[in-house]
Image (cartoon, rainbow, N blue to C red):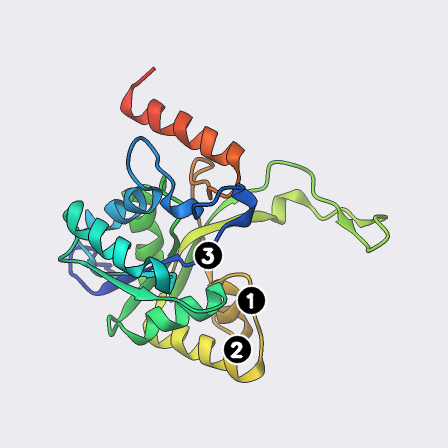
């Protein structure tokens, strides 16, 4: 099967509506500066450079829509980015994004994962077009224990079968929309979009990502992000 990646048939929903209480800052984590630029802008720029991305839907808090629209203009992204208000939960925000795009394929990405590369996004998208759905992930490095509510170990899963899931996650638009509608009708709240797809029987292909594709959620993550960015740019 030949997969074409230079035709614009995909949208990406970038989710950035959370408040990020674990960061311990007044400002939401996605708007903190990373080398003098908001984290969310670093993320958007990755997708803006990809030839198969027709539109970027940035889903943010209603109160943050105006400043995000202003940043989109300031950083020259106004031709591809549509800023919309999100919902109470991440799942609700993704669903709102799905309702405003009609692209055949859709990717969902965390706004605070600015270090995903164009090659990784392309690999995930390509796998989705070939297999139907795909997600980025990395093998778990540590031994993982299953623990009960009294903090006793109940099992030690085989580490070789465990992967830490990242974003983007890519799906046929109609499939992901159906998965979200099914979850909503049953009152189910999942932790990622792949879980919703799995619930209605959609097989999901795992594509190996990178350990540097971190989700910035804590002050330690922000420090590490500065290190990664300096390493990328050759700064000391």
Q: Is residue 7 above or below residue 95?
A: above
Per the model, the C-alpha gap separating discs 2 and 1 is 8 Å
Q: Earlier in the sequence, mark 2 or mark 3?
A: 3
**In contact (CB < 8 Å): disc 2 and disc 3:** no
What residue is at 65 percent from the left and 36 percent from the top?
142
Q: Residues within 10 Å of mark 2 (few under 14, many from 20)?
A: some
Q: Which residue is mark 3?
A: 18
Where is residue 59 drawn, in percent x and y? 35, 62
What residue is at 51 percent from the left and 79 percent from the top?
184
**Which quadrant holds the C terminus?**
top left
What residue is at 36 percent from the left and 61 percent from the top?
63
Q: Which residue is mark 1?
A: 190
Per the model, the C-alpha gap separating discs 1 and 3 is 16 Å
Where is residue 150 drawn, in percent x and y? 86, 52
**Quarter-wise, where is residue 172 in the image?**
bottom left
Q: Residues within 10 Å of mark 1 (few under 14, many from 20)?
A: some
């Amino acid at each position: 099967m030949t997969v074409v990646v230079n035709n614009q048939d995909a949208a990406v929903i970038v989710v950035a509506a959370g408040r990020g209480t674990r960061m311990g800052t007044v400002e939401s984590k996605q708007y903190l500066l990373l080398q003098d630029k908001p984290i969310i802008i670093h993320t958007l720029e990755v997708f803006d450079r990809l030839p198969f991305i027709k539109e970027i839907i940035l889903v943010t808090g209603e109160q943050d829509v105006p400043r995000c629209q202003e940043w989109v203009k300031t950083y020259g992204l106004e031709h591809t980015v549509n800023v919309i208000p999100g919902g109470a939960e991440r799942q609700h925000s993704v669903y709102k994004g799905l309702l405003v795009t009609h692209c055949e394929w859709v990717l969902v990405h965390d706004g605070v994962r600015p270090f995903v590369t164009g090659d990784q996004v392309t690999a995930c998208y390509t796998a989705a077009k070939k297999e139907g759905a795909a997600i980025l992930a990395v093998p778990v490095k540590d031994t993982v224990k299953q623990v009960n509510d009294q903090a006793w170990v109940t099992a030690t899963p085989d580490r070789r079968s465990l992967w830490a899931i990242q974003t983007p996650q890519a799906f046929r638009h109609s499939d992901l929309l159906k998965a979200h509608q099914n979850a909503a009708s049953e009152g189910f709240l999942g932790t990622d979009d792949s879980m919703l797809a799995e619930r209605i029987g959609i097989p999901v292909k795992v594509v190996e990502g990178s350990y540097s594709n971190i989700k910035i959620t804590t002050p330690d993550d922000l420090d590490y992000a500065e290190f990664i960015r300096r390493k990328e740019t050759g700064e000391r």
